[in-house]
Structure formats: structure tokens, C-alpha cells
Amino acid sequence: RTRGPARPPFSATRRLPRVHDGAGGSGTDGGRSGGNMMGEELAKWVLLAYGLFMTTLVAGVVYGWQSFRAVFIAEGVLSEGCDADSADGECPSQAKELGLIFACGAWSVQACRMVTGLVRDRYGTRVCVVGVMLTVAVGIVLLAVSPPQSLAVFCVGYFLLGIGAGVQLCMQSISMLFGEYQGAASATLSGAFTLSAVIPLACAEAIKSVASDDDGGTASSYADARGGVLSAWCVTVVVFAASAMWLMPRGGEFRESVRYLVGERGGDEKNKREEKKNDDEDDEEDGDDESHERAPANAAKAANGHRRAPHEGKSAREQLVSLDFILLAAWFTVMLLPTNYFIISVGDQLEGMGDDDGEITRGFQLVWVISTVLSPIAGYSADVVGRGSTMTFAMGCYAASFAMLGFGGDGGGGLSLKAQWLNFVCFNVGRLWVFSMYFVSVGRLFGFRHYGTLAGAGLLLSAMSTPLAVPMHQSGVDGGFGESNLASAMICLGLTPYTVGW
């Protein structure tokens, strides 16, 4: 039989369109014009901006807890167990139940990203982002309509809100488009996760404004305002979930989205063939222990113009059981305990210092949001100074912030109430560095082929430490926060041998 001329095994028409340089341009030999090259450069930044916005809209909103907590207390949410003397403030039983709501959301942020990571790797970024955002919309609805004394509905709503963190996980691979500046791009996307706290802050201010205008700030006016404001946020989330159907790639490679934005889609059949070939390569790699020695992964990394990750090309199973991943995930898991304890307890500790009107507590959320501008510096530090030194700096910031709150039996011995602004800066810088270094390290050590699975696995493991923050908070409510603050500082200092030795 006559088969016709055989196609060369490494035909330029098959291989070269998948190779991009560090600036996002194509590696083809003269097949594109200079104008298109500039179009790809612009598309790269458009995708980064879109990823930053989507991440801000839903990914880290759980950590805007202090804003939600203030309006919940003003409305009288979960205040049935409080006596008349605490009608104008938070009583111990209410403080504990509100802390439990946050713990549900914080646990979801960490644990459910394993599921979203697997969905992203198996079904693609588009399906994952749309599904996550619609799930968040359901959570927002529950928070909007929940009866004031229904702890279960608030917990479920906040749990679903935490699933929005999966959007940030999906957006992290945008950093692949930025070559040698991958660390800075990844840290910037992590910064958008921090910026998400501006959404609860804006919602809380709108709720207070509407409630005050409607009926002088009664409990019923707060409940009505909560329903209206959160419903508007829900509609916004649904609208942008629809936009992901066009701008998110079907697979895990954002180069597909770049081609879409510059008008070089090449037809649906072409994209499907390329995705099928990528999936086939993934299956071969997982099924054959020797597949990590194949040339295409090396070629792609070399063409991208930056160094190959030490564990890149290995199967997901091999990467998960490597010592580097085990140590990184363990470090992140332990650091999440003081992180979540600080967020749960800081409002109560500040009120114990005399912040009765919540002005200083609102300042904590404001500093949280503003600290986002420092996120590229975290990535740049990892690129230039090194991950170990950057991680050690982050833990030092944590230890200092707990010392500023105080180690005394009643939480005393720290800075004065007005000086806690310095504490907010210190903690938020440290927290931003911790999260940035985790995501940057996963990409730098293991590449992005199994990024969703690896990052999600570490986040699932870190969820184990989140519930431990609840008894630490409850102990502080009953007998003072000094011992819990000291324990948190010692945890941070105890991890320095790992980061210093990196």
C-alpha cells in the first residue's frame, strides 16, 4: 500500500508553535509578524490583569473576616447567649461561635484547593474556575439570607466562600508566561489573594451605610442591608464566572488564551488536537517511570529561557513523595496555625486593649489590603535573595507581631493600642511572604505540569492545623491570650533551621 510521504518526527509545523520565549513571543522561524509578537506581549499582561481581578473577587475573601465580624456583632448575629450587659458589644459565647464561622471558611480555603487542583489538572482551568465561582455564589446567597441566630447556615455559607481560593490556584500558571520573572508574577497573583479582603471591607461599609440610612442601625435594618449588599456581590460573581467561559483555557496552558486574545485560535479542532496530545503525554509520563528523561520537557524549558525545576518531568506520585515536597508542605502546615490564630483573635485582643469602637480593628483590615502592593517584592526576593532567606524573614515578622500583642497572662506586655499599627504591618508582610513562598516554591521545585495536584495536596495537609486555632482562641477568650501568643511566636522561631538551611 502507498502511504504517502512520512511526516518527520520533529516537524517544525508540529512542534514549534508550542515553544515560546521568556517574553511570551512565539518561537517559530519567521511565521509571525512583529505586530503579532507585540500582540502576544499585550495579551500576556491582559491575562495577568484578568487573573488578578478574578482572584481578588473571590479567592481570599474569607480573610476579610474582621470586616464581616464587625457588622455581624452590630446586627446581633449569634447573640442569643449574651446577657443584657453585653448588648452593645461581643460576649464570650458570641465570640467563640463567630470564631467557629471563620474556622470553617479558613479550613475550606486550605482543604478544598486539593479538590480544585485535581479538577483543574483533570478537566481544565475553564471548568474549574467556572465551577468554583458558582459555588462561591451559593455561599454568598447563604450568608445573605441566613437567620441571625443560625450558626449552621453561617458556617456552611462561609465554608463555600472559602472554596473560592481555588481560583487563585488556577491562575498561578499564568506566571509561566513571564519567563525568568515567573517568581514575581506568581507572588503578584498571591498578592491578589490578599487584596480579596477589600471585598468584605467594602461590603461591610456598604451594609453599615445602608442600615444607618434605613432605620438608624437597628438589627432588622442590618439584616436587610446584609441581604441586599451581598446579593449585589453575588450577581457580580456570576457575571464574571460567565466571562471565564471565553478567557480561561480549556486545559492548563494559558498559551491557548494568549492565542485566543491575539486572534490566532486556529479553530476548535486544532485546539482539541493539541490538548489531546498534551493529555496523552501526561498519561505516558504517569505510567512510565522513565518518561521524565524524554526530550520535549527539556526542550520546552530551555526555550522558555529559565532554569529547569529540579523535580520537573517526574510523575505526580514521584513529586508528592519527594523529600523537598514533604518538607515544604510540613513547613506551610505549621505556619498556618499561628496565621489563623492571629486572624481569629486579633479583634478580641484589640478590644481587650480598649478598641471599643473597632477603629483599630478596621485599621488591621486596611493594612491587610494595602500590603498587597508588596507582593511582587516577595517574588523578587525569592528570585534574587533566595527562598530560604525570604522564608526566614517572614517567620521573623510573625514572631515580632505576636510579641507586639504581648505575652502576659492577660495579653499584656506588648505595644500600646495606638502602636498596634506597627504590628499590623509586620504581620501582614510576614503573612504575604509565607503564602507567596509556598506557591513560588512549588513552581520552582516541581514545575507546572502537576502544579494543581501538588499545591492542592500541600494546602489539604495544611488544613489539618486550622482547627487547632479554635481552642487557642477560646482559651484566650476565657483566660487571656498571652500564652497562645507566646506559643505562636515559638512555633515560628522553631522552624528557622529548615529555612536557614535551604
Image: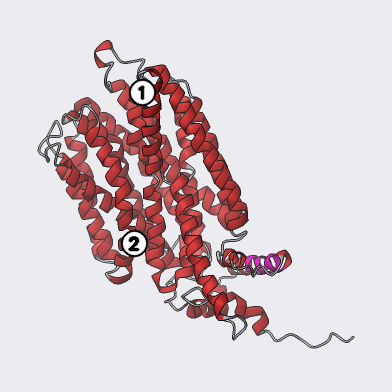
Q: Is residue 388 left or right of residue 108?
A: left
Q: Is residue 52 left or right of residue 73?
A: right
Measured as percent of width and height from the top left, residue 178 is found at 45, 70
| Circle 2/circle 1 CB separation < 8 Å | no
Q: Is residue 277 magenta?
A: yes
The amino acid pointed to by label 2 is Pro
The foreground one among 447 and 220 is 220
Measured as percent of width and height from the top left, residue 251 is found at 60, 61
Nearest to viewer (mark 2 / mark 1):
1
Residue at label 1? Answer: 212
Q: Main secondary structure of the magenta part?
A: helix
Residue at label 2? Answer: 376
The foreground one among 81 and 45 is 45
Measured as percent of width and height from the top left, residue 139 is found at 51, 35
Q: Give the range drawn in magenta.
A: 270-279
Which residue does the image show at 20% across and 54% down from the upper left?
A: 396
Reply above or below: 237 against 267.
Answer: above
Q: In this view, does 89 lie to the left or right of 187?
A: left
Tell me, yes or no, if residue 173 can be seen here.
Answer: no
The amino acid pointed to by label 1 is Ser
Residue found farthest to the front: 213
Q: Where on the picture, by quarter, is residue 123? A: bottom right
